[in-house]
Image: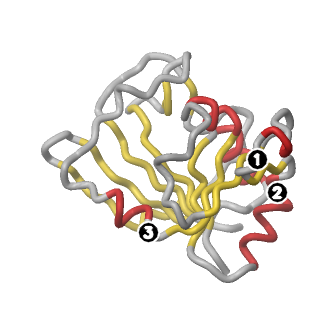
Amino acid sequence: MRLVRYGGAMSLDGYIATPSGAYDWIVQDPEMDFAVMMSRFDTFLIGRKTFDTMGRTLKMMPRDATSIIFSRTLQQPDHPDLIISDNPVSTVASLRMKPGKDIALFGGGDLFRSLLQANLVDRVEVSLIPILLGEGIPFLPPPAPQTRLRLLEQRLYKKTGIVGLQYEVIRT
């Protein structure tokens, strides 16, 4: 079964973006190889708010990957070059059963929360950025289920102070 992996950057105080959705505070470490990271996936799950923040473009995604935008407001005829779904739970449950690489849950704390509640998230992978934002969009918005995690890997990027963490979701 394919793994669903939620990942991204987070401030030390638990935010993935400022209140306005800005993420210009996220620094890139020269040791991070995004091409290698992205090559593990052939499917990207993107929430509508994240899609809007990306400028409604998917330029950063690999060309041969499938990107699915989850929205109750976007209409498929208005975006013929995208896959749009309004049912993340059934869509992701079906995707997990199909052959392929792992599935990246690329954006959206709300989308993460709904898939976590449905037991459809297998890994949580975060780059902890050494900054305190004070307010913003939380990594996991409430209300969310209490979820146990098992540390799989950690890495310190000394040049920037970023800490990369990978956790497995423990099923109870």
- Name the residue: 43% across, 68% down: 39
**Badge 2: how crowded within 10 Å, few (<14), some, or many (20+)?**
some
Quarter occupied by the C terminus: bottom right
Marks 2 and 1, the one that precedes in the sequence: 2
Determine the image quadrant of residue 160: top left
Provide the residue designation for mark 1: 114
**Badge 1: how crowded within 10 Å, few (<14), some, or many (20+)?**
some
85 shown above or below 2: above
- Name the residue: 85% across, 46% down: 86
- The local secondary structure at tag 2 comes to helix
Place of residue 121 in the rendered image (x, y in percent of width and height, measured from the top left): 65, 60
- Asked whether the viewer can see residue 99, the reply is yes
Closer to the camera in the image, 161 or 151 = 161
Mark seen at residue 39: 3
**Residue type pointed to by label 3:** Ser
Marks 3 and 2, the one that precedes in the sequence: 3
Determine the image quadrant of residue 102: bottom right
70 shown above or below 36: above
- For the residues labelled 2 and 1, the Cα–Cα distance comes to 8 Å
Tell whether 152 sits left or right of 68.
left
Closer to the camera in the image, 98 or 2 = 98
Closer to the camera in the image, 82 or 138 = 82
Marks 1 and 3, the one that precedes in the sequence: 3
Place of residue 157 in the rendered image (x, y in percent of width and height, measured from the top left): 20, 50
- For the residues labelled 1 and 3, the Cα–Cα distance comes to 25 Å
Provide the residue designation for mark 2: 89
**Residue type pointed to by label 2:** Val
Q: Are marks 2 and 1 in contact (CB under 8 Å)?
A: yes
Q: Are marks 1 and 3 in contact (CB under 8 Å)?
A: no
**Nearer the observer, disc 3 or disc 2?**
3
Quarter occupied by the N terminus: bottom right
